[in-house]
């Protein structure tokens, strides 16, 4: 027992004694009037019905009642104790992911185990592994195509974040690429976190051709909030498409590396280029070395209620008082 939730209830402890004192004074001041009574010959037998035979111990009854009252008051004060504090990491990253899911992310210009896979499928595998290793970090996710949407706000619930991202399909947010809207939305989510270091990782395979917010406006918002933006450009440079495997043909829309580089430079971040599966894996490994920021959350200790202990003792004492009063 560490403390009481409502310690002020202790003030009612002398209440029975105060009631007894004032009742006695009122009784002494009242005029005693003896009205005519109806005589009942068998009254003594009625009064003795259901009682034990024997003389009650008045002093012992009083002790038991006092103990019962004390226990009831202690129970009303809600004694509590606390369990072992839950372990909370002292440091954590606050990372908002902004991932392109436009139609061009369906291009199958990457290989995994000798089999062609789409850009989004590869990103899902790599990012899911990245999320799983971020125990103790806060992560959030913005997906974007022609529009930008917050799929998950910044949270330590990494399991839910990973499950939500696994269900995302190509083109779910539109076929075009609204980089400005996505960055602005990621900034809005990240700015709500009370931390000195805030990070956005933006991944895209195209250029800004949709949305209502320009890239320059979004970058300015990030700079005002002190948010560092790391950008990743994804997509193979070329893919052999002819029957003889000799003709290089560019697939998908052109990647705007200039814009992605400008975003990173303006916010103190860094631009990465992922041309292969190994590149993308290595990029997220590099990002793991980002500066961490302390969390101000207090350790969580479960509170355990103990009011039932004095309550049970009080009921036992009250029962014993009744037994003694009946002469048991």
Image (tube, rainbow, N blue to C red):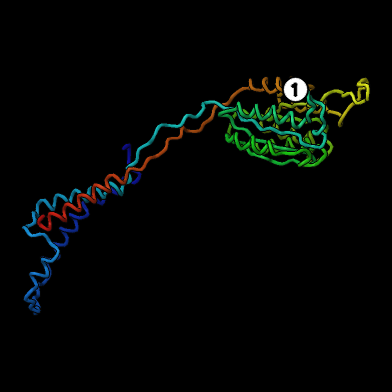
Q: Residue 220: x percent and y percent?
A: 74, 33
Q: Quadrant of the N terminus?
A: top left
Residue in the image at 58% along x and 26% along y: 293
Observer-nearest residue: 36 or 132? Answer: 132
The reply, left or right, for residue 81 in relation to residue 242 is left
Secondary structure beneath disc 1? loop
Q: Quadrant of the C terminus?
A: bottom left
- Look at the image and tell me whether residue 261 can be seen: no
Observer-nearest residue: 171 or 215? Answer: 171
Query: Is 256 located above or below residue 143 in the figure?
Result: above
Query: Is 239 located above or below residue 5 in the figure?
Result: above
Q: Residue 277: x percent and y percent?
A: 75, 22
Please give the count of numbered marks on the rendered protein.
1
Q: Residue 129: x percent and y percent?
A: 65, 27
Q: Which residue is mark 1?
A: 113
Q: Residue 141: x percent and y percent?
A: 67, 36
């Amino acid at each position: 027992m560490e403390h009481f939730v409502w310690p002020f209830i202790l003030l009612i402890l002398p209440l029975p004694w105060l009631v007894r004192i004032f009742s006695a004074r009122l009784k002494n001041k009242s005029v005693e009037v003896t009205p005519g009574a109806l005589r009942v010959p068998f009254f003594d037998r009625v009064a003795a019905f259901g009682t034990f035979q024997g003389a009650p111990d008045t002093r012992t009854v009083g002790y038991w009642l006092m103990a019962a009252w004390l226990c009831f008051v202690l129970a009303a004060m809600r004694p509590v104790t606390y369990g072992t504090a839950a372990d909370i990491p002292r440091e954590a990253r606050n990372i908002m992911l902004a991932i392109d899911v436009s139609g061009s992310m369906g291009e199958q210009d990457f290989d995994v185990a000798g089999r062609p896979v789409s850009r989004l499928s590869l990103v899902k595998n790599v990012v899911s592994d990245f999320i799983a290793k971020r125990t103790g970090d806060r992560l959030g996710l913005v997906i974007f195509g022609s529009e930008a949407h917050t799929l998950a706000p910044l949270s330590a619930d990494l399991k839910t974040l990973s499950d939500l991202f696994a269900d995302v399909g190509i083109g779910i947010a539109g076929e075009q690429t609204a980089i400005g809207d996505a960055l602005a939305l990621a900034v809005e989510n990240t700015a709500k976190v009370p931390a000195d270091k805030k990070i956005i990782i933006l991944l895209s395979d195209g250029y800004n051709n949709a949305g209502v917010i320009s890239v320059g406006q979004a970058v300015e918002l990030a700079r005002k909030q002190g948010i560092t933006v790391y950008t990743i450009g994804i997509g193979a440079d070329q893919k052999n498409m002819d029957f003889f495997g000799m003709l290089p043909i560019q697939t998908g829309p052109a990647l705007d590396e200039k814009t992605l580089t400008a975003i990173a430079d303006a916010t103190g971040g860094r631009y990465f280029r992922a041309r292969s599966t190994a590149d993308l894996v290595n990029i997220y490994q590099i990002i793991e070395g980002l500066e961490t920021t302390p969390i101000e959350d207090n350790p969580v200790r479960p509170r355990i209620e103990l009011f039932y202990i004095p309550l049970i003792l009080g009921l036992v004492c009250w029962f014993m008082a009744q037994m003694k009063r009946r002469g048991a």
